[in-house]
Image: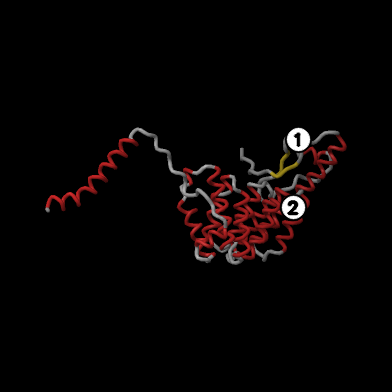
Amino acid sequence: MRVGRWLSTALPLLLCLAVYILAQQRLTGRTVALASPELLISLPRFAQVLLAGGDRHLAANLAGFRVLVADTGRMKAEDYAVQGRLQRDIAWFNPVHEDNFYIGAAILPWNGQVDAAQYVLAKASAARVFDWYPLFHYAFIHYHFRKDPVTGARYLLEAVPRATSPQDQWALQSLAAAWIEKGYNTASAAGMVRAMAANTPPGGFRRYLEGRAQRLQDLVALQEAAARFTERHGRRPGRLQELVDNGLIAAIPADPFGYGFGLDASGWPILNTQAPTSK
């Protein structure tokens, strides 16, 4: 009886051990492929909601968990495409979702998913009217990835009223002014920065914007003088002083920020981006 009970207990264990040893022998020496990242597939939105019991916010959280645990160090382009679809889904389920727009801004555009990032940030910007960060990231992607500083500056200015700190408001306006300078012709940029200054409360930041507008207006005067110089001599100036020597401008303007003005390789007046070195 004791032998029978021992066999009934030990036999299953012995069989499991035999199967384990056999499997180990069959697998020894074989190359084990890395498992695919967690972002293997993205289900249709209705299926995700169905699996979440009809709760869209829960569906957003479940998809967000998949994004959060994904090992981005192992992901390939096709995996980021799946992540982009997942984050679009999250933005559709729950556009207020904070982690989604932060992750979208930090990862998606840098890995070829610019459209997905902008979809997520546009949804978040419309839903999170109390928050200027989504608009800031949305503007930055226009500036950096789409090479469109004009549109980027427009969204930065839309973000200004959402910022509760005067420092944040000033920073957004200052950045917008710099982008406007890059994206508009000089005269238009001067007018826009001047208008921004007029709509800013009196104080240091207003004076800063007025200084930026003034240097742009001075640059317009230099460029107009350079155009007249070219008409007169059939070439562009080699030095700004030539504009003064030819009576086309009274003096080279003083830059309120100390960087001064210069000429590009073709002889066209530009704003210097670095202060002159003292000798």
Name the quadrant of the C terminus: top right
Of the residues shown, which amino acid type is indicated by label 2?
A: Ala
- For label 2, the residue is 189
For marks 1 and 2, the one nearer the N-term is 2
Q: Is residue 175 left or right of residue 12?
A: right
Q: Residue at x 71, y 60 (%)?
A: 196
Query: What is the x, y in percent for residue 68?
Result: 47, 54
Disc 1 and disc 2 in contact, CB within 8 angstroms: no
Res 170 → quadrant: bottom right
Res 175 → quadrant: bottom right
Of the residues shown, which amino acid type is indicated by label 1?
A: Ser
Q: Residue at x 65, y 57 (%)?
A: 156
Query: What is the x, y in percent for residue 265?
Result: 73, 35
46 or 174, which is in the foreground? 46
Total marks placed: 2
The extreme right residue here reads 232
User: Which secondary structure lies at badge 2?
Assistant: helix
44 or 264, which is in the foreground? 44
Q: Is residue 192 left or right of residue 9?
A: right
- Residue 266 is tagged as 1
Q: Residue at x 67, y 51 (%)?
A: 178
Is residue 50 shown above or below 242?
below
Res 198 → quadrant: bottom right
Query: What is the x, y in percent for residue 143?
Result: 65, 49
Query: What is the x, y in percent for residue 164?
Result: 58, 66
Distance (Cα) linking label 1 and label 2: 22 Å
187 or 97, which is in the foreground? 97
User: Which secondary structure lies at badge 1?
Assistant: loop
The extreme left residue here reads 2
